């Protein structure tokens, strides 16, 4: 015989699993009468759980969006996915409060069966995350409010206003229609229509000084390749070096080897011209050395010097005498 508490949890589980259920259906599943189901519903409501019901022959019960979250019941696979997902979010430094992550993990672990708890902890202790930025400075921490405001504004098609500090340290005020948010290599970006420039623009979220929603809305922009636009914009970001390289290959081969965010490709009589701005030329040199087709550096001279230095180092390692 089941205890009243067990039956209460069973009712809650049914309401969590189904969008709505009639009292008669709940009674049938629990093998009780409809009057007893009403008592269970009243008990759940007295506990502060947002159980709502509609009267009438077609009435049914459902869980509303109340101020208190009802007890969650996860399958084994869901619990593992939740805990490991929270760990990944922490390691990638997503803009989520660390205390909130640890609290969510602790609460999830507290309700896991012993065997599953041991499996989850074994996964956490044995997995190592390599979040490398290839020797560069770590990405700056992002204010989670900025991400939340932009995400909700993009979903609701609501204009925002923000103060932005550019890479040149110039501060401007913008009215902006956000189309979405992109996470790329440790940084968060948004793209949309900038009313200051009256054009599509990309902004890095950690450079937004302050942000608020505007009362105005904007029209749905339709199908937009948000990731493609952001990556293309990053390839055109100004830098101290203007790289121009001749690739003696076809456009199909060049596009297969070079993502859009690494530069622009242009057909010429001798092959393909790769152009982009760069602040660091070492990675550009490594990229060129990875190609299996002829390459010629047009500019800058500093890139040629790096390639000669790399060649000398390779020769010494291989025991080859340099000229």
Image (cartoon, helix red, strand yellow):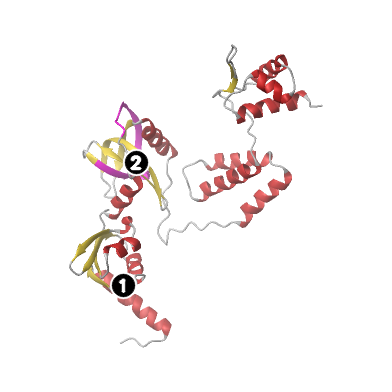
Select label 2 or label 1 by which is in front: 1
Residue at x 72%, y 24% (from the top left corner): 30
Quadrant for the C terminus in the image: bottom left
Name the quadrant containing residue 303.
bottom left
Q: How many marks?
A: 2
Q: Residue at coordinates 27% horizontally, 63% vertically from top-left? A: 251
Q: Nearer the viewer, residue 198 or 162?
A: 198
Circle 1 is placed at which residue position? 293
Looking at the picture, tell me which residue is in the foreground, 290 or 26. Answer: 26
Q: Position of residue 80 (x, y in %)?
A: 62, 46
| Dot 2 or dot 1, earlier in sequence | 2
Q: Are marks 2 and 1 in contact (CB under 8 Å)?
A: no
Residue 38's image quarter? top right
Residue 274 is labelled as none
Is residue 109 magenta-colored? Answer: no
| Residues rendered magenta in the picture | 200-220
* Disc 2 to disc 1, C-alpha distance: 42 Å
């Amino acid at each position: 015989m089941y205890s009243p508490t067990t039956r209460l949890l069973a009712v809650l589980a049914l309401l969590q699993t189904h969008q709505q259920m009639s009292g008669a259906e709940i009674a049938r599943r629990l093998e009780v009468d409809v009057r007893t189901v009403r008592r269970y519903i009243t008990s759940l409501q007295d506990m502060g759980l947002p159980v709502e019901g509609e009267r009438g022959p077609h009435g049914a019960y459902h869980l509303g969006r109340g101020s208190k979250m009802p007890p969650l019941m996860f399958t084994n696979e869901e619990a593992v996915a939740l805990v490991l997902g929270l760990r990944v979010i922490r390691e990638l430094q997503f803009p989520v409060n660390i205390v909130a992550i640890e609290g969510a993990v602790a609460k999830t672990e507290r309700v896991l069966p012993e065997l599953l708890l041991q499996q989850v902890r074994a996964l956490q202790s044995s997995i190592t995350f390599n979040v490398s930025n290839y020797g560069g400075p770590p990405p700056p921490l992002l204010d989670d409010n900025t991400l939340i405001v932009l995400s909700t504004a993009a979903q609701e098609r609501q204009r925002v206003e923000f103060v932005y500090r550019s890479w040149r340290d110039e501060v401007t005020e913008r009215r902006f229609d956000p189309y979405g948010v992109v996470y790329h290599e440790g940084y968060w970006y948004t793209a949309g229509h900038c009313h200051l420039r009256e054009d599509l623009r990309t902004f890095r979220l950690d450079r937004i000084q302050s942000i608020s929603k505007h009362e105005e809305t904007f029209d749905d922009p339709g199908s937009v390749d948000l990731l493609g636009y952001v990556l293309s914009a990053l390839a055109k970001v100004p830098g101290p070096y203007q790289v121009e390289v001749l690739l003696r290959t076809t456009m199909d081969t060049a596009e297969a080897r070079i993502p859009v965010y690494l530069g622009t490709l242009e057909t010429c009589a001798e092959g393909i011209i790769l152009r982009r701005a760069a602040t660091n030329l070492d990675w550009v040199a490594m990229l060129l050395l990875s190609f299996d087709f002829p390459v010629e550096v047009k500019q800058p001279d500093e890139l040629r010097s790096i390639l000669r230095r790399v060649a000398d180092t390779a020769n010494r390692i291989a025991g080859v005498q340099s000229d």
